[in-house]
Image: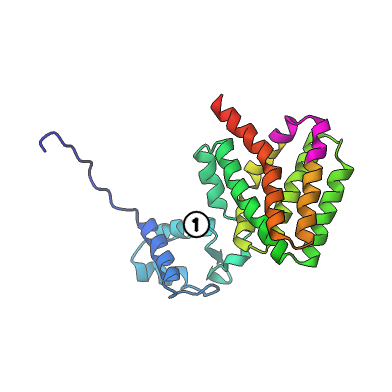
Amino acid sequence: MENISLSPVKSKKAYMLIVEGILNLINENKIEYGDKLYSEPELTKMLNVSRPTLREALRVLEFLGIVTVSPRKGIRINKPESTDSYMPLIYMLMFEKTTDLELFELRRAIQISMAEAAARNRSEEDMKVLEDIVKNTVKHMDDDYQVFAKLDYDFHQQVVKCSGNNMCCKLMETLNILMQKQMVDIIYNLPVEDRKLTVDLHEKVCGFIKSREPEKARDAMQEHMERPYRFYKSKKEQ
């Protein structure tokens, strides 16, 4: 025991305690989405903190998309469906230096599952958008690789939208910066003559989603993602 050194215990900063307190109130259903919180002067008095400390907490909560602070409307708790993405997650992934293989494995798991869900849940409107994307991909098959990569990205995003899973839609939208970079990389390394296989598999997935065949849509998406998956696995092993 004599050789063990312990670091001093550091207390959490006051603004983080405020953030955690509000998150706990939401989790315990004591604050509902859309509720208006007290005013800044009232909160500083209730919490016995300075205005700069409170504002630091509110900045964090705004960044997380949990509250909206407005001079006229005050402080309101946001509804989850009013946010398009989970922005803090993308920053975390960037700082963590997420590898291409890790990102692709996450995408692969989501896409395969969502292709199956899309075949069950897609609306006629979402199906029409997916079909139009596939047609455009065929039309631009020989275009610049960045154009083709963007259409490939749009296809995968729309499949998830067809699933009706709002959380997965937001997650995929959050990953868009990393995903688009990765898809450009994949298409850049794909010979133009091999793009037809990508187009064929897009049509295959789209067809099974349209005919509402979940298992076949899932298997077709898995087949579609197998080649780039092998590409990233081989890069890691080099």
Q: Quadrant of the C terminus?
A: top right
Location of the N terminus (image quadrant):
top left
**Residue at screen point 43% across, 69% down:** 27
Segment colored magenta: 185-197
206, 3: nearer the viewer: 206
Q: Determine the residue located farthest toward the top in the rendered image.
A: 238
Q: Where is residue 103 shown, x and y percent of the image?
A: 58, 42
Res 104 → quadrant: top right
Query: Which residue ends up furthest to the left in the rendered image?
Result: 2
Q: Residue at x 82, y 51 (%)?
A: 133
Does 88 sit above or below residue 117?
above
Q: Is residue 36 magenta-colored? A: no
Residue at the spot of label 1 = 59
In the image: residue 124, left or right of residue 3: right
Which residue lies at the image location 80% right of the left edge and 65% below the top edge?
Answer: 125
SS for callout 1: helix
Q: Residue at x 34, y 53 (%)?
A: 13
